[in-house]
């Protein structure tokens, strides 16, 4: 099943929706298919088959009216952290696979650091071992970016083969 990226009226990404919800929003006149700079619509190659016709499935939809986001922060999950940090070591910027990735506590847990969105980052094993039981400053290491609270899009795990990635999403959602 293809997913559709739903954008707010101001082009900020809201979340991913299934093809049925996308077609419903489109035909109710609540959203339109986003086009690239050349005017090509952001659509999947496959069609949604109805009893009367085949309809191209939109890959990216933009709402006509701005909506308020109602989102609650999820509990801490590794896959969301990995997506937030783009599957990249936050010390050396190496791209990592599921088998290579580790979680580093910026303030080590042995020194009172909690497992939270604002204290954990993705790290490769060599960097995590080098940092050991120190803060990044004490270890002489710099974070690529400060840990932040994830967005709803980080909760959709597109990196592990659960769904396809559409090239038009690149300008709205960072991808590995």
Image (cartoon, helix red, strand yellow):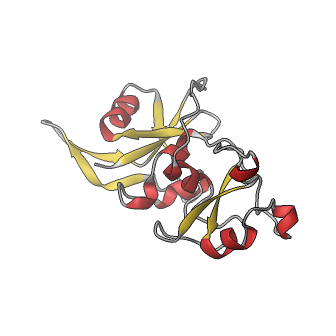
**148 sits to left or right of 174:** right
Q: Which image quarter: residue 142?
A: bottom right
**176 sits to left or right of 127:** left
In the rendered image, the residue lying farthest to the left is 51
92 or 159: nearer the viewer = 92
Image coordinates of residue 17 in percent, x first then y, are: 40, 38
Image coordinates of residue 18 in percent, x first then y, are: 35, 39
At x 58% / y 72%, what residue is drawn? 95
Examine the rendered structure and indicate whether residue 126 appears above or below residue 65: below
**2 sits to left or right of 122:** left
At x 50% / y 39%, what residue is drawn? 15
Examine the rendered structure and indicate whether residue 67 appears above or below residue 82: above
Image coordinates of residue 161 in percent, x first then y, are: 36, 60
At x 79% / y 62%, what residue is drawn? 134
The C terminus - image quarter: bottom right
14 or 59: nearer the viewer = 14
Total residue callouts: 0
């Amino acid at each position: 099943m293809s997913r559709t990226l739903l954008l707010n009226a101001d082009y900020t990404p809201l979340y991913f929706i299934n093809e049925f919800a996308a077609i419903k929003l489109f035909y109710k006149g609540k959203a339109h298919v986003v086009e690239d700079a050349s005017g090509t619509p952001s659509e999947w190659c496959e069609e949604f088959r109805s009893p009367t016709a085949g309809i191209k499935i939109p890959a990216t939809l933009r709402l006509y009216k701005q909506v308020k986001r109602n989102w609650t922060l999820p509990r801490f999950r590794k896959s969301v952290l990995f997506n937030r940090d783009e599957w990249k070591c936050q010390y050396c910027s190496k791209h990592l696979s599921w088998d290579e990735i580790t979680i580093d506590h910026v303030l080590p847990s042995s020194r009172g650091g909690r497992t939270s969105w604002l204290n954990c980052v993705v790290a490769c094993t060599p960097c995590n071992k080098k940092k050991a039981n120190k803060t990044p400053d004490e270890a002489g290491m710099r974070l690529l970016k400060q840990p932040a609270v994830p967005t709803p899009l980080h909760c959709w795990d597109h990196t592990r083969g659960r769904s396809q990635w559409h090239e038009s999403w690149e300008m709205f959602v960072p991808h590995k």
